[in-house]
Image: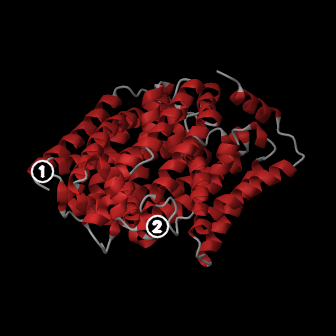
């Protein structure tokens, strides 16, 4: 990196801090801090939902898969996410918004107290918080790896830089700072992504036809939809996991719907996010698909995207790409921190310490900022020790993807009347069954990646649905009323 690249990166950080300061004056209470007062417009919510599903891991772990296995990364990740969010737009997203309007919730797990019971809510809140520590730590480690490739800075320095910038602006600005950063980073990402797309087309020297002829210059299996171990079965498993994740099982994504003004607005936001997932990754992944043409037999394929940037972009544009990658990661990690602190502040601490149950607006906002600070600090420590958990891919795919389903299933299906007989006891059984499956697969590994990643979710889903349908116990009046209200039109 040259001086101009560092200047561009510094301007990006300045923009972040400016957004944080601006948002600071819009935040008057915890509702503003956690849900933007329920005032997110559909286009801002949709863009924020979309970019909050990216991180530097896309340019490290996923770039490595694009290098070694080709087009399948779009099929099993972006395409399945697009389908998942589109389904969620009609059946799940509007219900999240109505929950805030009807019940005044500020965290995704808050409604579980009424829907199930206290023990179920606490189990989901605690396990989900622990999982996000690993997930967010993996994303911080990913961007640190890219900074190392670009500038030679140590991984430790990269983690600390990204982590503490995120720590500052999200702690002072809350969700408003987060979503406006999302918009800014989306603009930067589009500029950077289109620049890389054009530069690779130029290097291939086939004109616009290079989009098609690229595949003739790569191994035949790289053009296939499914490339072992990323089989059709694996894609179907990821479709299930992504549905539960992107419809709100990943809590920061639920917050994008909760913070809208109505169910109809949340639906439009989800449709916009879905369309972006179908289209934008095709452009974003194109340079990653082409990397084997320029760099054969890389010892570490996860470095391929960074090498492309350094090889083909002039000074200044390298800084733009790096700013885009920082923006990707900070968007996701900051939104994670904001939402998890809502769960801790609203659902965990008041149970452990009754004095937190009736805080004034001033003290509630102070608690929100303290929990955000502490959670982000914990993810920084996890990122610094990511090697102990299998690296970036290990943290994000092996841990997060496998553990997400068991806690997301009661959250998402609990919003639907069809599963009203699945009560708190059934929810706990399904969660524990999924977690036990995860542990057993760690002790007795399977050769199939689809089974290793998907089995915990499938087991939880079967336990939750079958036990609920076999149950003759009718839901309480409160649960019946809640589900009826969530199903009603705005």
10, 94: nearer the viewer: 94
Q: Earlier in the sequence, mark 2 or mark 1?
A: 1
Distance, label 2 to label 1, CA atoms, is 33 Å
**Residue at 26% across, 54% down:** 161
Label 2 vs label 1, nearer the camera: 1
**Residue at 34% across, 30% down:** 23
Image quarter where the N terminus lies is bottom left
Q: Which of the 4 quarters of the picture holds residue 263?
A: top right
Q: Is residue 104 visible?
A: no
133, 9: nearer the viewer: 9
Classify 130 as above or below 295: above
- In the visual, does 13 lie left or right of 385? left
**Where residue 34 sits: x, y (%)?**
48, 35
**Where residue 153 sits: x, y (%)?**
20, 63
Res. 315 mark: 1
- In the visual, does 43 lie left or right of 56? right
Q: Which of the 4 quarters of the picture holds residue 444?
A: bottom right
**Where residue 385 sits: x, y (%)?**
38, 68
**Residue at 73% across, 31% down:** 482
Q: Is residue 438 visible?
A: yes
Callout 2: SS:
helix
Res. 387 mark: none
Res. 394 mark: 2
């Amino acid at each position: 990196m040259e001086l101009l690249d560092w200047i561009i990166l510094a301007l990006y950080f300045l923009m972040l801090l400016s957004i944080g300061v601006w948002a600071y004056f819009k935040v008057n209470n915890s509702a503003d801090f956690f849900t933007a007062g329920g005032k997110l417009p559909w286009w801002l919510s949709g863009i924020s939902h979309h970019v909050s599903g990216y991180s530097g891991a896309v340019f490290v772990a996923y770039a490595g898969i694009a290098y070694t296995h080709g087009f399948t990364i779009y099929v099993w990740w972006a395409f399945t996410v697009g389908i998942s969010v589109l389904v969620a737009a009609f059946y799940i997203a509007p219900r999240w918004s109505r929950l805030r309007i009807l019940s005044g919730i500020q965290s995704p797990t808050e409604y579980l107290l009424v829907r199930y019971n206290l023990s179920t809510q606490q189990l989901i809140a605690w396990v989900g918080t622990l999982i996000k520590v690993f997930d967010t730590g993996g994303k911080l480690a990913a961007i640190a790896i890219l900074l190392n490739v670009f500038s030679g800075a140590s991984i430790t320095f990269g983690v600390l830089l990204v982590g503490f910038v995120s720590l500052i602006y999200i702690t002072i600005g809350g969700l408003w700072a987060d979503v406006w950063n999302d918009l800014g980073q989306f603009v930067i990402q589009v500029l950077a992504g289109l620049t890389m797309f054009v530069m690779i087309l130029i290097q291939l020297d086939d004109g616009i036809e290079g989009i098609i002829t690229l595949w003739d210059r790569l191994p035949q299996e790289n053009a296939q939809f499914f490339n072992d171990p990323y089989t059709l079965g694996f894609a179907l498993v990821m479709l299930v996991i992504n549905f539960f994740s992107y419809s709100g099982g990943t809590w920061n994504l639920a917050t994008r719907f909760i913070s809208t003004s109505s169910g109809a607005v949340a639906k439009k936001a989800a449709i916009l996010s879905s369309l972006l997932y179908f289209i934008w990754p095709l452009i974003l992944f194109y340079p990653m698909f082409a990397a084997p043409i320029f760099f054969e037999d890389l010892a570490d394929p996860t470095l391929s995207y960074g090498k492309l940037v350094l090889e083909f972009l002039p000074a200044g544009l390298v800084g733009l790409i790096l700013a885009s990658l920082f923006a990707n990661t900070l968007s996701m990690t900051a939104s994670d921190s904001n939402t998890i602190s809502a769960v801790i502040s609203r659902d965990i601490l008041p149970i452990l310490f009754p004095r937190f149950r009736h805080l004034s607006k001033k003290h509630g906002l102070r608690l929100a900022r303290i929990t955000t600070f502490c959670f982000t600090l914990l993810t920084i420590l996890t990122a610094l020790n990511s090697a102990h958990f299998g690296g970036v891919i290990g943290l994000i795919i092996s841990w997060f993807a496998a553990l997400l389903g068991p806690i997301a299933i009661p959250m998402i299906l609990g919003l639907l009347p069809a599963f009203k007989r699945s009560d708190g006891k059934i929810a706990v059984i399904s969660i524990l069954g999924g977690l036990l499956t995860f542990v057993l697969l760690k002790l007795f590994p399977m050769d199939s990646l689809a089974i290793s990643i998907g089995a915990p979710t499938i087991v939880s889903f079967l336990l939750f649905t079958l036990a609920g349908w076999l149950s003759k116990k009718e839901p309480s009046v409160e649960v019946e009323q809640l589900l009826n209200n969530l199903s009603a039109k705005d």
